[in-house]
Image: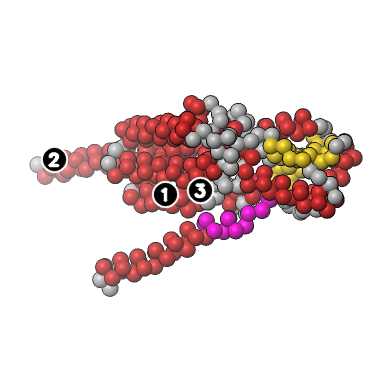
Amino acid sequence: MPSRNRQVIAAVVLVPVLAALALWAFAWPASRIAPRDLPLGVAGPATAVTQVARQLERHEGAFEIHRYADEAAARDAIGDRSVYGALVVTPQGPELLTASAAGPAVAQFLQQAVAQRAAGEGARVRTVDVVPTPSGDPRGVVLNAAILPLALAGIAAGAAVTLLGLRGRRAVLALLGASAVVGVVAAGIAHSWLGALGGAWWAEAGVLALSTLAVGGAVAGLAALAGPAGTGIGAALVMLIGNPFSGATSAPQMLPEPAGAIGQWLPPGAGTSLLRSVAYFDGAAATGPALTLTWWAVLGLGAVLLGGALRARRVGAGPAADRRELSAVA
């Protein structure tokens, strides 16, 4: 069969396969959003808390219940990102503490779930948003929308370094510079212009830059080791797995397993969690996602350096072999 015919057949088969994979990766998690061991606090008198906890535990596998002595402790737990919200039993009636900054979809779900429970008991629940989203982005859509452009920026940086033929230290410097510029520009737009982020400006810029570097380093590193195919592998990993599994629009605990766990080990998911921590929670629970992004960046840049060194060795081995052949002939 002529090579051109094989290429046509490959394209006809490959495109639908990629389309089906992309549809599955994005549609499957979105269609299965529900709480799975979602950390939720309960606070108040011991007897009342035990009763509330038992009622919540009837939703098997939905919540991971954390008990606190009082409302202050529950608020601290929300601020530390140990729980997404808390149901507090008070003499005036039940009170729901939420944190829309941790995920507006989660806060809305908790309100609906608790409202249904209260309606069945004839009680009225007062809701308090302990950590709200900034006034510039009350629905929290800017942070969610920023994940895809950051992933694209990282892929573009890695692909550009590869296409321009940059290798070794020059490639590393280009990736570092491009990521730093992306971080500054993104922070300028999201924080300064749109008012969607409420943390320290430079810390947010650093998170955005590190997220870009993690993706760019991975793409360029795979390309340096595996050739042009590495660029496609890195881009597919980020776009088809990392982005839909990131939990940016809800929370990792709202995605079907193992999507939620996988997403937090990839740059888009780790970047989302780290940006939330830095922008809204004064850096609480930032260590894990920061280490994940650093791990991706270091491995990616290391692969870029290794790939450059291996290529230089191969190039140097060629002339050396030619000289040996000439010496033997002489």
Determine the main secondary structure of the stretch shown in magenta: helix
Please indicate, yes or no, whether residue 216 appears anywhere in the rendered image.
Answer: yes
Q: Nearer the viewer, residue 320 or 232?
A: 232
Q: Which residue is mark 1?
A: 235
Which residue shows up at 82% across the image and 32% down it?
69
Helix, strand or loop status at disc 1: helix
- The image shows residue 65 at horizontal and vertical percentages of 77, 43
Task: Tell me whether the residue at label 3 lies in contact with that at label 1, contact meaning CB atoms closer than 8 angstroms.
Answer: no
Q: Quick one: label 3 or label 1, which is nearer the N terminus?
A: 1
Task: Say whether residue 78 is left or right of residue 192.
Answer: right
Task: Tell me whether the residue at label 2 lies in contact with that at label 1, contact meaning CB atoms closer than 8 angstroms.
Answer: no
Task: Say whether residue 232 is left or right of residue 287.
Answer: left
Q: Quick one: label 3 or label 2, which is nearer the N terminus?
A: 3
Q: Which residue is mark 3?
A: 242
Circle 3 or circle 2, nearest the eye:
3
Which residue shows up at 48% across the image and 26% down it?
202
Magenta-colored span? 25-35
Up-down: is 80 above or below 324?
Answer: above
Residue 32 part of the magenta-drawn span:
yes
Which residue shows up at 76% across the image and 48% down it?
114
Number of on-image labels = 3
Q: Quadrant of residue 137?
A: top right
Q: Residue furthest right?
A: 47
The kind of residue on which mark 1 rests is Ala
Residue 34 part of the magenta-drawn span:
yes
- The image shows residue 216 at horizontal and vertical percentages of 40, 40
The kind of residue on which mark 2 rests is Ser
Calculate the distance from the C-alpha at mark 3 to the C-alpha at mark 2.
Answer: 54 Å
Q: Which residue is mark 2?
A: 327
Using a 10 Å C-alpha cutoff, classify the residue at mark 1 as few (fewer than 14 neighbours), some (14 to 19) or many (20 or more): many
